[in-house]
Amino acid sequence: MNIHALRTSERALHALELAGRIEAGALTAAAVLARCEQAIAAREAEIGAFAALDLPRAKKSAAASPAGPLRGLPVGVKDIFDTADFPTEYGSSIYAGHRPRTDAALVSQIRRAGGLLLGKTVTTEFAHMAPGKTRNPRNPQHTPGGSSSGSAAAVAAGMVPIAIGSQTGGSVIRPAAFCGVAGFKPSYQLLPTVGMKCFSWQLDTAGLFAASVSDVAFAAAAIADRDLRVDGMTPAQPRIGVMRMHIWSEASEAMQAALEAAARAAAAAGARVEDVPLPPALEDAWRAHPLIQDYEAYRALAFEYDHHRDRIAPTLRKLLDNAAKITAERYDEARRTARRARQLLSDLLDEVDVILTPSAPGAAPRGLQTTGNPIFNRLWTLMGTPCVNVPGLADDAGLPLGVQIVGRFGRDKSALEAALFLERAIERAHA
């Protein structure tokens, strides 16, 4: 199996470069918006990344030259975050035309940072697995992943330089991998989820998409008001533990080859790379994830299930039917399993700086009936650790193959720095 360099999209908008040029006076926010508008006009009918758009409002905002680190850069927001200026429908007909009176906390942070809210991106229903209308910009015959399908696709198609998503199982890292962009799932609760439609309060994590690791780190730093930027630095040579996990056989031949290629590139660039087995306690936690998620989803979506069950998609309806049978005792035991695993993972990360593992079982599946499988993501969501999809590799068909860097909880900048190191190493290896 041959692994290739991912062809760089000519449409990609690099947030860091654009913000720098605006700050230097070489570009305006209005000019950036015009580029987004051109990409939307060219591809939105085919890709379907947006659930709602308001270009006239965006033009008025851009003309005011917003201040803040984002400098008026357009941002797409997944349609599970409340917005006062746009409908918020959560991907469900139950909420058709729903207009919140306030913005979600994260949306307010974007505005405070000088971001320009361009529109709401498509989500699967309640951020679960029933596919939306969005197609993969790399190949529209393939899924963009989910549930943050519109956000990943909008960035990959050059419609926005920054987009917001969320992850409960694998809904940031997997679509980023499928669409060939950088995706960042921060440490649990680093970004606020107030005003975000809840699916699982122990797992739901807000995240971001951008063209490259430096871009997504810049966006995260601006929105979170934290020291997360990694541009302008020479990243340290990290200690990388390659973890194939107990589900390694579920990875495609191409994904297995991509992980090995990424590990070789990192080693050639000076990283200390070693194999790290998955401890049994972490395998137990992997199995505990869906139990915790489903138990909480049955309660988080109680109103919808009790009053509109027939309007919920069959896949989610079946999940909730089964979740009603999960006892509190089983749920509590699953939480204890997760707590033990987090401690063990902390001990493991004393030996290596980060873990390298697949972002998905393979490239984006063909067809729009699935959003892909989150089996390589859900453990890390449960652990609450920062994860970064590192783009740069592709299969023989040119479809992206993402690998992810997993860091220690609360060490988000270190994880982003290691991801930048790997991104550059992959670029050099395939130059």
Image (tube, helix red, strand yellow):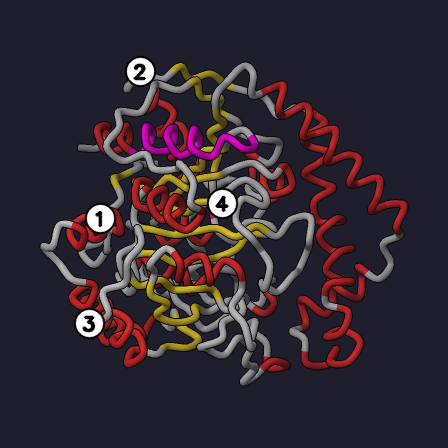
Q: Are marks 3 and 1 in contact (CB under 8 Å)?
A: no
Q: Secondary structure at mark 4?
A: strand
**Which residue bears the numbered disc 1?**
8
The image shows residue 316 at horizontal and vertical percentages of: 68, 67
**Which residue bears the numbered disc 3?**
38
The image shows residue 311 at horizontal and vertical percentages of: 68, 81
Quick one: quadrant of the N terminus? top left
- Of labels 2 and 3, earlier in sequence is 3
Residue lying at 78% horizontally and 55% vertically, measured from the top left: 295
Q: CA distance from mark 3 to mark 1?
A: 19 Å
Q: Secondary structure at mark 2?
A: loop
Q: Is residue 428 left or right of residue 412?
A: left
What's the residue type where badge 3 is placed?
Gln
What's the residue type where badge 1 is placed?
Thr
Q: Secondary structure at mark 1?
A: loop
Q: Are marks 2 and 1 in contact (CB under 8 Å)?
A: no
Q: Is residue 413 magenta?
A: yes
- Of labels 1 and 4, earlier in sequence is 1
Q: Nearer the viewer, mark 3 or mark 1?
A: 3
> Magenta residues: mostly which secondary structure?
helix
The image shows residue 314 at horizontal and vertical percentages of: 68, 72
- Of labels 4 and 3, earlier in sequence is 3
Quick one: quadrant of the C terminus? top left
Q: Secondary structure at mark 3?
A: helix
